[in-house]
Image (tube, rainbow, N blue to C red):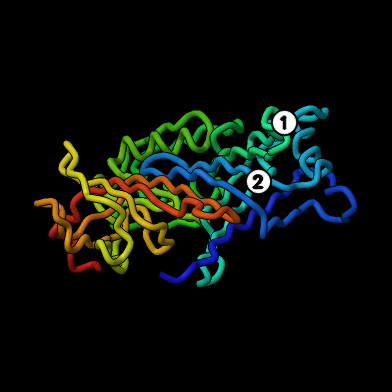
Amino acid sequence: MSFVNRLLRATLTLPQGTFPGTNSNTLVLTNMRMAAHVECAGNFTNSCDLHIWGMRQVDMNAVTVLWGQNGDPQTVVANAILVLEANDETGWLQVFEGQFYDAQPEYKSLPDVSLLVSAKQGYAAQILIAAPSSFAGAVDVAGLAEQLAAQMGFAFENNGVTGTLHSPYLPGTLMDQFRELGKAAGFDYYFDAKSTLIICPRNQPRLNQGSTVISPTSGLVGYVTLTRNAGVEFDCIFTPAILLGSPIVIQDSDVPGTNGQWFPYQMTHELESVKPGGRWFSHLQCLRFPASAQGGT
């Protein structure tokens, strides 16, 4: 089996100031040892914990002191950005983008020091104060969802959500308001790696998405497991083409009832670069792809 050189690239953007020795508030790090844990789930924002080894101490200090400076900590968090990309020799593809709410060197592991960056997608929209959304009369659900997505700075994708609400009142942060809208209107939502907010009818997949085949010869690691909610879960080689809510086809599984078309509602990625034998895997939890949506793939 041929060796695949797998790399991660992290871009850190400071909300204020510049990185030492530069005129830029952006630092791009690649060809370094990194370990990323990325959580993606329906009806939640994506999150990332990233360890980076080999950074200059002054660069680690530049992100560490953000929370020790004067100023509004909420504003600092809203504009401290982490972008994570992955490359398995097929080109760079974005895995995560969000605001980092903590970044600290782990000196307790001397001399093997890493910077640990913790980030969430849409974190600012979860913590910043927002005016309530209040309407009189009938309101189109999809239109209101798109309006809230735009206010949070996200692109928007609707996969067949329809209906109206009568005189809705949505308090809290913008993300609180969006969650309440989803509960009231009965839709699920997902985020992709490039900050698109995606809505679907409850327990339904995205429309017009191509299928990704998973089998023992195309990425499947170990065996597929049936779950109590009539779904499946399994491990596979990390594949950027696998997206929340989009169809996958399990083939040649030895476990009865697991072959066929499914869609993931939760994914966890474990990615390591510049480490011999490093992890490059995903754990997926999926629901059965409904027969009524088969024509949309």
- Disc 2 and disc 1: Cα gap in Å? 13 Å
In this rendering, would 97 be left or right of 224? right
In this rendering, would 101 be left or right of 95? right
Q: Is residue 131 above or below residue 29?
A: above
Q: Where residue 215 appears, x then y in whole percent?
A: 25, 62
Which residue type carries mark 1? Answer: Tyr
Q: Where residue 31 appears, x then y in whole percent?
A: 66, 60
Toward the left, the furthest residue is 256
Q: Where residue 187 appears, x then y in whole percent?
A: 30, 44
Which quadrant holds the C terminus? bottom left
Which residue type carries mark 2? Answer: Ile
Describe the element under mark 1 as helix, strand or loop: helix
Q: Which residue is mark 1?
A: 107
How many residues crowd mark 2 within 10 Å: few (<14), some (14–19), many (20+)? many
Tag shown at residue 52? 2
Out of 295 and 65, give the one closest to the viewer: 65
Q: Is residue 151 above or below residue 177?
A: below
Q: Is residue 236 visible?
A: yes
